[in-house]
Image (cartoon, helix red, strand yellow):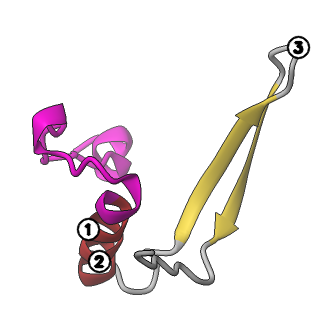
Amino acid sequence: MTEKQQISYKYAKPIPDIDDLNADPFVQFRYWFDAALKAQPGDANAMVLANADTSGRSSARVILLINFLYRLF
């Protein structure tokens, strides 16, 4: 096995069809986040936040999600 094969991770799950997603993005996020907590409880809250400024320059940083509250009003 090559070094690349040893560190390569195969993503087995297919890309979801848009019709299978919840119309409310907060409900959908809660579903994905709960699934991530079950799969990787120690790493589920690590994520990358990326954005671009008005000139198109991109920026990205690793952050930890500390709290997620979803309330129905």
Residue that sits furthest to the front in the current view: 73
Can you say whether 4 is above or below 46 in the image? above
* Image height of 2 relative to 34, above or below: above
Specify which label sits upstream in the sequence, 3 or 1: 1
Q: Are marks 3 and 1 in contact (CB under 8 Å)?
A: no
Q: Position of residue 16 (x, y in %)?
A: 16, 40
- In front: 5, or 23? 23
Q: Which residue is mark 1?
A: 31
Determine contact: label 1, label 2, CB under 8 Å.
yes
Answer few, some or many: residues within 10 Å of disc 3's Cα (few below 14, many 20 plus, some between 14 and 19): few
x%, y% of residue 68? 53, 78
Taking 45 as reference, is 12 above or below it?
above
Q: How far is disc 3 from disc 2 in space, using C-alphas?
A: 36 Å
Q: Earlier in the sequence, mark 3 or mark 2?
A: 2
Residue 34: mark: 2
Residue depicted at x 68% and y 41%? 50
x 22%, y 46%: residue? 11
Under mark 1, the amino acid is Tyr
Residue 49 is situated, as x and y percent measured from the top left of the image, at 66, 50
| Magenta-tinted stretch | 1-28
Amino acid, disc 3: Ser
Local secondary structure at mark 2: helix
Spatial CA span between label 3 and label 1: 34 Å
State which quarter of the image contains the N terminus: top left
Q: Which residue is mark 3?
A: 55
